[in-house]
Amino acid sequence: MTGILIGTGVLAAVALVFSLLLTLVNKAFAVPSDPTRDQVRDALPGANCGGCGYAGCDALADALAAGKAPVNACPVGGAAVAKKVASILGKDAGAEETRKIATVVCQGTVDRCKTKFTYYGIEDCLAATLINDGNRACKYACLGLGTCVRACKFDAIHIDEYSQIARVDEDKCTGCGACVTACPKQVLDLQPVTLPVRLLCRAAEEGYLVSDNCKIGCVGCELCMKACKFDAIVMENHLPIINKEKCVGCMMCAEVCPTGAMWGDFDNRHIALIDRDLCIGCGICKKTCQFEAISGERKSVHEINEACTGCGQCVPKCPKKAITLPVRLHVRDANAKVGTSEVVAAIPETETTK
Amino acid sequence: MSSLLLIIVGGVLVNNFVMSQFLGICAFLGVSKKTETALGMGMAVTFVMAIASLFTYFIQRYLLIPLKLEYMQTIAFILIIAVLVQSVEIVLKKTSRSLYQALGIYLPLITTNCAVLGVAINNTTAIEGGYNLIQSVVNGTAGALGFTLALVAFAAIRERLALGNMPKWMDGFPGALIGAGLMSIAFQGFSGLIH
């Protein structure tokens, strides 16, 4: 019995001495740290996963406090942590519009893009690139061997089993860019998640070469450039370049594209709606509209017809603020006639502000 | 001198911590995906094992043996190693920022690693009456170097495996574990080196 007591006593004494020692060492060697940095550190999740690219949360907190990392650098914490960090650092958290995701700039699935030969080598895009620039007929095509899948820490990118090209899970993608650097074909690109139109082809070649290889590649026909009424598209190296500042999201370029290389987010296409009770028939919107989508006599209520592309140019011009710009699909879902005040009332507040 | 040489050869090859004593498997599987991090971890383990051997020797020799408390060895050693690693981390942070950044993330990971505890206990049980001070430190360092060797070699294998065309059921951990088993068998080849 006394043996146990002695053992316990000695160990407790040793523990006490050590804890005192540790406290003293901590005091003596305390490193003065920035209180803002400590607050930032507390706001971070603390899992030390390294998903941000820094060696753990402490390193990220240092970078954040020094202003070297963006407030939304932590992919795990997401918007909630970004908001906290921003309030500590006195910065703007940045809206959802600025969230970027990896985009696969190729739609050359196996049924659309020809294959040069059957590849039996190492299951890796970089290795496959070394053999005659990969087995796809188009040298800009996604090889679909999953180098990006292995680079992704968030399980956000997968190779589609049937089409054999990479697909990004928009909800899981944090925009860390690991796949962009891993891809030997530069098929991946970081783009804002809310872009209305995207050119999903990188084939900077003459049109006949592209159409030989792939059914959905950009052939450089310039129809999109001609269709754009806002001068937002210029041609460069046989490919259209979209000026994001000038683009209003009318999606006419995607609508006219003969191959489908220009992708439009048609699920989120907008439409203008005029509130009958507010419209005074001034006709300013009718003059502004580039698509002849607004009709109506002067001093009578104006109507929007099916030609509306949802470019939204009329909305700020209306002196009575009678025009709203909801997402088109929601209007169709409601089975309501376009351009009536009932529709406007039927659409929830959040939808109209989209 | 020859006994020290034997301890070194024994620690690095024959009684390799991971490959023949199966200690420190958690760190062995956890940080062996890249040779770079494996080397960093190995350095940190070497550092901690050397100083742990040093300090546990004093505790064993001047506290536990005189008080006949050898049976409390495990708890006492865990306590010492934890405090030691923690204070080393604090001191490093103040005195050598670059070393702290190089080892920083690995130090807390190995605070209670069984390989570190294992070396401390081995030092006291390897021969009758335990190793003396120099032998203890040499054994700790050699054991950790063996751990680093196994870790870096295994990481190199896994880097190759990751690119290989593995069947789905073998991809990832199953393949890695089989690789580890084969490596262990290879290390058994050293077992006749010393007696």
Image (tube, coloured by chain):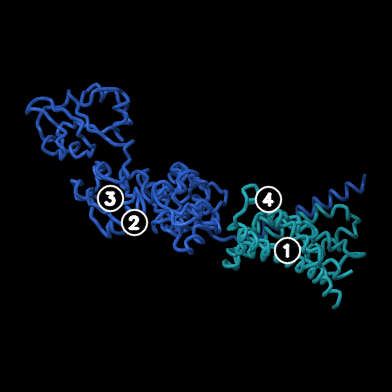
Chain colours: A blue, B cyan
Tag 1's secondary structure? Answer: helix
Work out whether mark 3 precedes mark 2 in sequence or the reverse, and give the earlier one: 2
Depth order, front residue of A189/A340:
A189
Tag 4's secondary structure? Answer: helix
The amino acid type, in three-letter code, at marker 3 is Lys
Residue occupied by mark 2? A203
Chain ID, mark 1: B
Depth order, front residue of A163/A264:
A163
What's the mark number on residue A244? 3
Q: Is residue B91 above or below residue A215?
A: below
Chain ID, mark 4: B
Work out whether mark 4 precedes mark 1 in sequence or the reverse, and give the earlier one: 1
What's the mark number on residue B147? 1
The amino acid type, in three-letter code, at marker 4 is Pro
Q: Position of residue B177 (x, y in %)?
A: 70, 53
Q: Is residue A57 left or right of residue B73?
A: left
